[in-house]
Amino acid sequence: MAIRLDARPPADAIAALEARGKKLAPSFSYLDVWQQEHADQFTVAKSAGFDILTDIYGGLQDALKEGKTGRQFAADLKPFLEKKGWWGRKDVVDPLTGETVSAQLGSSRRLQTIFDANMRVSYAVGHWTQFERTKATRPYLRYVAVMDGRTRPEHAKRHNLCLPVDHPYWNTWAPPCGWSCRCTLQSLSQRDVDRMRGQLKFEPPVDDYRPWTNKRTGEVLWVPQGIDPGWAHNPGKAGHQAVIAAEKLAAAPPRLAAAEVSDPAWPAEKLADEFATWFDAAAANKRVERTVFPAGAMDAPTLDFLAARGTVPQTGAVTVSAPTVLHMIRDAKQLRGTSVPARILRRLPELIRRPKAILYDRRNPALLYVFDVEGEARLGKLVVRVDFRDKTRVPEGGTVKVTTNSVRTAGLVKATILQDSNAYELISGSLE
């Protein structure tokens, strides 16, 4: 079955694929990359030892943006893959065992499977982004199976199941639930639920589990009946989890937010990947759904410093607005030599989490997050205003004012200037 693509490029699905493309990971078997790992990286089984991931990933990007079918995708890629030797059945060495095995590399059918799986996952991430964005007005999700006789019995059993967006059931049963799964999720308002109540089901079926052995690792896993091994997770939620976690920082008490970002498990790299995609759109002056992006949070030493000065921020979150991105990019074009390169600003969440130093500007009260800039003798700085009143667009339409700790500008500065104790006070780190 061909994937139906929207008439216009699906921005959220494109962003999801771009985020996964930040990490191209060659592998020998699909069992080497497991479940949620696929949300963080792009891989193709039997790609190890062949320089083909960039070609396949680029082909998927073009197909998603241009609305190509799986057949067109395969036809476009075939000549490149044949030229690189990744086509047909060949003897290859398994890097895990060192054994030479006969393996199917590229084929039109295999490329169709790659296209189908990656498109469905990209759309799932894009859809989940929308579900999170609109759950205040559309708080329910409905499981929709294609009831045409070819549907897996367990998937058909869940057709019309209706549960809240935040229900843990969707952590496992969120389409696609296997290879070539055609099921989807549909968001519903309370009015929709009331209107469809006669056909909806509000109690999920009890899961039956079967043992399954990963032949690559020997690990025995229990997989729900009806879900293919490796698909018992929420691909959409996994790809969006970093931003969801960051958005919660704004609502959390400042001390709790500081503890969250200091935890080694904090998804700093994933958040920076999501931020980079948002940054590029904002820098191009495109419409972005999230006009204020949560880029991190203050750490405990900074909160201690502010408390000693009688300041307790309303939130610990540090944010960046789309207008500020435009301002910084314009500076980069007009003030050459004094602005921070966009390639560095695109990874801003990482700068906020691990700066070289944090200072307090005595004369013009603000926090300065200071960092090294490769190839530059001067230091980079981010100017963060505490308890800044900003505007943000909301899913229901319109804008609201929020109080946050906002990055207002960025620039390059000599270390000797920042060492002026009359103007700046060191909170943490070092300028050496």
Image: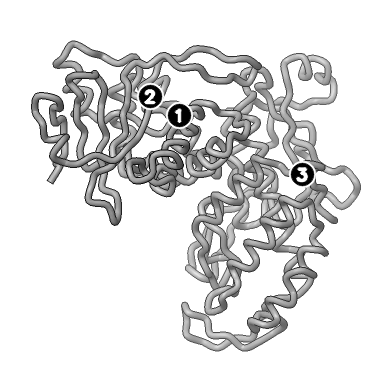
Query: Which residue is drawn at the image coordinates 84% and 55% (left, top)?
Result: 2
User: Of callouts 3 and 2, which one flags the residue occurring earlier in the amino acid sequence?
Assistant: 3
Residue 111 rendering spot, x and y as whole percentages: 73, 67
Q: Which residue is mark 3?
A: 183
User: Disc 1 or 2, which lies upstream in sequence?
Assistant: 1
- Closer to viewer: mark 1 or mark 3: 1
* Front in this rendered view, residue 406 or 196: 406
What residue is pinned by disc 2?
A: 406
Looking at the image, which residue is at 63% across and 81% down?
84
Residue 420's tag is none
Q: Which residue is mark 1?
A: 324
| Label 3 residue SS | loop
Identify the residue shown where x is 52% and y is 62%: 24
* Type of amino acid under label 1: Thr
Residue with the most extreme right position: 148
Examine the rendered structure and indicate whether residue 17 appears above or below residue 257.
below
